[in-house]
Amino acid sequence: MTARQPLTYAAFVELASADPAVVGLVLKGSQAHEGMATTHSDHDLYVVLADGVATPLTRHAGHRTSELDLVILTLEEFRAVGMPGFERYALARARIVLDRLDGEIARILAAKARLDAGEAFRDAGEWLDAYANSLYRSVKNARDGHALAARLDAVDSVRFLLELLFALDRRPRPYNKYLEWELGRHPLPGWDTRALCDALDRISRTGDPSAQRALFARVEGQARRAGHGAVLDAWGADLELMRPEAGGDEGRDRAP
């Protein structure tokens, strides 16, 4: 393609589909999330090549324009992407454009979309401790009059909480852009999506200790049922500062 005729998504898909070295094409990002693409959205495409097979398409490696971003890699490399890593959610919700391997590309994506039990349990325990740490710092700072620190710690706690909740459901956490999209189509078990998003919004904006404690009450119960009681118990008496105050917080805020 010349500078006056830039490589388009449709043109590249046609080109790649005619190349026998290409065993898969996988579209990720806004174009793969129904209803999320805008006039500013490009096409983020993984081009999966058969291992050990040469192709002239590799000259397009690293291609990036406002229309089309390409990642060209071998099948072996594609299996490893996001395992673990930032790309895991993107591929968990990616759309298959081409699969020449009798469903193998689909099986690879399905594996990225589901954490195995051991991985999920380990990650959930780590995220639970990180969430408790930021929550504790936030409510303690609010108590001691450090309003900015309290809000910043509250924002940190939301990040760790989302990692925890998705790990408990054995799913990679969606990027912030796709959080409401994900929850609207695939709700977290036992959580009211709208109420949860409202609570996260309020906590992120205000750092309200009562809202944080009300949410923690729900999280504590779920975490203990999932076998993470030891992580919580390690906090000892400090747990009391995170829990709803008797006769206080519980009456003002309902957890989602």
Image: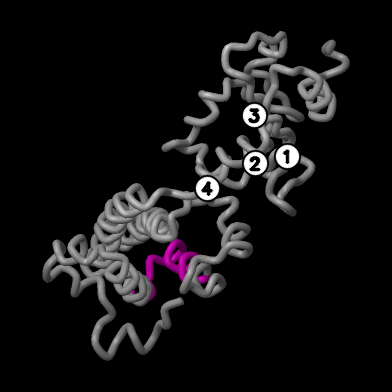
Q: Secondary structure at mark 4?
A: helix
Q: Are marks 2 and 1 in contact (CB under 8 Å)?
A: yes
Cβ atoms under marks 2 and 4 closer than 8 Å: no
Residue at the (79%, 24%) spot, across then down? 17
Badge 3 crowding class, 10 Å Cα cut-off, few under 14, some 14 to 19, many 20 or more, is many
Residue occupied by mark 4: 113
**Residue at numbered disc 2:** 29
**In the rendered image of this protein, does residue 10 appear above or below residue 32?**
above
Q: Which residue is mark 3?
A: 46
**Residue at the extreme right:** 4
- Would you say the residues marked 1 and 4 are in contact, meaning their CB atoms lie under 8 Å apart? no
Amino acid residing under circle 2: Gly
Q: State the residue in front, 156 or 76.
A: 76
Point out the frontmost of discs 3 and 2.
Answer: 3
Give the label, 3 or 1, closer to the camera: 3
Residue at the image position 64 percent from the left and 29 percent from the top: 46
Q: Which of the labelled discs sits on residue 187, or is there none? A: none
Bounds of the magenta span? Answer: 198-211
Inspect the image, locate mark 4, and give the three-letter code of the amino acid beneath it: Ala
Report if residue 155 is visible in the image. Answer: no
Dots 3, 2 in contact, CB < 8 A? no
- Position of residue 98 relative to residue 218, above or below, is above
Determine the residue positioned at 51% across, 43% down: 111
Name the residue nearer the viewer: 44 or 242.
Answer: 44
Query: Which numbered disc, 3 or 4, marks the residue that appears first in the sequence?
Result: 3
Reading the chain from its start, which is encountered first: label 1 or label 4?
1
Name the main secondary structure of what is drawn in magenta: helix
Earlier sequence position, callout 3 versus callout 1: 1
| Quadrant assignment, res 193 | bottom right
**Residue at the (28%, 80%) spot, across then down:** 244
Residue 56 lies within the magenta run: no
Determine the CA span between mark 3 and mark 2: 11 Å
